Image (spheres, rainbow, N blue to C red):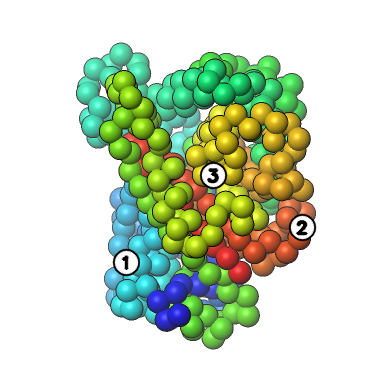
Amino acid sequence: MSNDVAIIGVGLHPFGRFGPKTAIDMGAEAIRNALADAGAQWSDVQFAFGGSFEVDNPDAVTSRLGLTGIPFMDVYNGCATAATALQLTADGIRSGQYDLGVAVGMDKHDSGAFTSDPTDYAAPPWYGEMGYFLTTKFFAMKINRYMHDHGISHETLARVAAKNYRNGALNPNAFRRKPVSEEDILASRMLNYPLTHYMFCAPDEGAAAVVLCRADQAHRYTSTPIYLRATALRTRRYGAFEVHASWAAVDQEPAPTVFASKAAYEQAGIGPEDVDVIQLQDTDAGAEVIHLAENGFCADGDQERLIADGATEIAGPLPTNTDGGLIANGEPIGASGLRQVHELVLQLRGQAGERQVAGDPKVGYAQLYGAPGTAGVSILTT
């Protein structure tokens, strides 16, 4: 039991737009909130991992919290950054090196698309010069093929986005808190066919933090520890068609999420049928559709019926992105996955308010997917 890991505190800085407030200040606020939730002090923290896309040195957050000299490591792994920070923090405790640590993610993105150099993603320079280096294009191509192969309709994409806007309206920390109808989603500007403007998430600002400790010490801090049963990261294999790929193999391989998911289920000793609350990477509505199958919650094509029947709604048997997901919260890259963990912890504690899943949920599942083809999965239990 001494190598097991418990989550004893979660903290969030709201997601959205916050004027001149820096990402570092948002990260510090998230850590303070997580420590207060844990009943712990910054002086109790033995080590930390921080993740960010825009901030060169997330460890600078220590200047806001106290220069205690702890080892603070900075990580970046695309949209799987937060899952990476979480796994590394957990591994520091599982190894026996530390008893208590913090994972924090923070970011502050301008409006509009992310900008990067294609060569930083192992793509050739011409890929960007020809106008192909667009994440919206990749996600549109992937769901368009998936819709063709598995009978998914445009209306299903709209239902996913509308559900996440509704859930976001129940979340006081969400960026987009106004419900949007399926009709308005379908009628909004087409960005990359078949995905319309309101089917995409948007870069924004925010931070999230999680306090972890040895499971056998968790009750020193909280009466409601949540246990981190599995963390798994996987990258793409040859033949997988992933974001920023400038070519496609003849024979296709499953996406990295499939392998990360299987590894996480094996670590946790449970299956998808045991999961009560789900958080999936919904960069766009199509991604949530595909990820439902890639994470084992249904077979390819079953999403059409399940989503029409309301299975992924808060009151359904597969409650998915109960806090609005990326579509309602936006994506400050470094913070996004720890936001998922924040929501799962609230759900498993029964503290999610209007968006609480009924029936005393005991197992939560979070998945991230990011460039250039990296997936992270975490499984939490009461």
Name the image quarter holding residue 50.
bottom left
Q: Is residue 37 left or right of residue 217?
A: right
Which numbered mark, 1 or 3, is in the foreground of this view? 3
Q: Nearer the viewer, residue 158 or 58?
A: 158
Q: CA distance from mark 2 to mark 3?
A: 22 Å
* Classed neighbour count for the residue bearing mark 3: other residues with Cα under 10 Å, few (<14), some (14–19), many (≥20): some
Task: Answer yes or no: is residue 168 visible.
Answer: no
Q: Position of residue 274 (x, y in %)?
A: 61, 57
Which circle, 2 or 1, is nearer the viewer?
A: 2
Disc 1 marks which residue? Answer: 72
Looking at the image, can residue 186 be seen? yes
Asked whether 153 or 163 is in front, the reply is 153
Badge 1, how many Cα within 10 Å: few under 14, some, many 20+?
Answer: some
Residue topped by disc 2: 358
Q: Which residue does the image show at 37% across and 73% down from the upper left? A: 94
Residue under circle 3? 296
Alpha-carbon span between mark 1 and mark 3? 35 Å
First in sequence: mark 2 vs mark 3: 3
Q: Secondary structure at mark 3?
A: loop
Q: Is residue 175 above or below residue 70?
A: above
